Image (spheres, grey):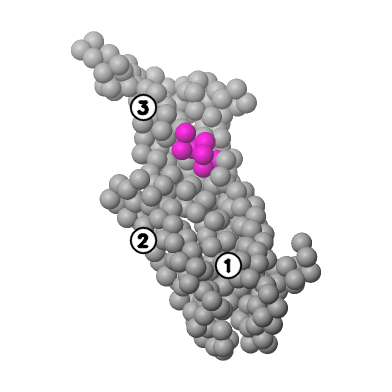
Amino acid sequence: MNLLTRYIAVAVLKGVATVLFVLIAVGTVMDFMAQLSDVGTAQYDLPAAAAYVALRIPRMVFQLLPAAALIGALLSLGNLAVHRELVVMRTSGISKLQLMRPVAIAGFTLMVIMAVLGESLAPSLGAYAREIRAAAMLDTEELVDGSSAWLKDGSHIVNFRREPNGLGFGGIYLFELDEDNGLRQIAHADTADIDQNNQWILGNYSETVFYGLEGVQADAKRQVIKDYGLSSELLNLSVVRHDLLDTNGLTRYIDYLEANDLDATQHLIAYWARMADIVSVLLMTMLALPFVFGGLRSAGTSARLLVGLLIGLTYYVTAQAFANSGQVFDFDPRVAAWLPSAILLLITTFALMRAR
């Protein structure tokens, strides 16, 4: 990497970092202010609220980095244009393609950061933040999407809720189907734990077995051990929102859903949208170049900021709209997730080709 390439790439990264810092600072303050209304509920105090907000920062960075990349690149490259540095570079024989290289390097760097955040850091810390808040407020609703979750494995269907402390499960209902998908057995347990061999230890257990015309048999025991083939890891994955699952966990849960002929559309869209968001940060960075070469070459900071905000907001709204329509209208999850980025790629390519 020569001196000029390093100079432009560092300028772009500094611009992005500055914009990102401002956006995160504003977002963090707003997030903390929103938590103040719940401070004092049960054991949810100011330190717990501060920890909750701090743990959500990586997720906020992941969400805001594409917009920050565009705005930061617009401001930093615009600053070079205002000070005639880009003009000097072009008149000295440096081509448009050579100027694209350092911007692309900056974009790839940001893309790597996005990948690290999106793969594990942001989802895992976000899930941990939610658990801290739920435990402090003694609220099981914070831990699951609703009061309970459902799982299916072969002939077994399980309905359960996770305990507020995250240890064990409660309110377990187990349904076993026969070969004709008729109900063979209903069981209930007040508590459940799963050992290292994936065996279920059920407390205050009761079951009702149906024998067709032969009658019904009911039984109750203080504790039983059952083997249902469902691991504690799978149960934990099922009660966590898809945006709080790391990519590995999201992939495993998608595999489970597809293996049991269950609808995985929502999770597939979340998976592919995460991949598309990572790519979008590179496209957003590159999109700043044609604006600097073109109409915004001599524009002020406020004009560049406005353009960046409008494009970033448009992309975000479009991505959300396609994600929602993909679930409602049963689009292919890959199309629903990647189409906004594909449109952004076409716009970026067309704008770069026309830039002078």
Mark 3 or 1: the one toward you: 1
Mark 1 highlights which residue? 285
Q: Which residues are magenta?
A: 249-255
CA–CA distance in space, label 3 to label 1: 52 Å
Residue 256 is left or right of residue 50, and the answer is left
User: What label sits on residue 294 in the rendered view?
Assistant: none
Q: Residue at x 45, y 76 (%)?
A: 310
Q: Indicate whether residue 285 is drawn in magenta.
A: no
Mark 2 or 3: the one toward you: 2
The crowd level at tag 3 (other Cα within 10 Å; few <14, some 14-19, many 20+) is some
Q: Position of residue 284 (x, y in %)?
A: 54, 66
Mark 2 highlights which residue? 321
Against 251, residue 311 (above or below) is: below
Residue 51 is left or right of residue 252, and the answer is right
Mark 3 highlights which residue? 175
Q: Position of residue 107 (x, y in %)?
A: 62, 62
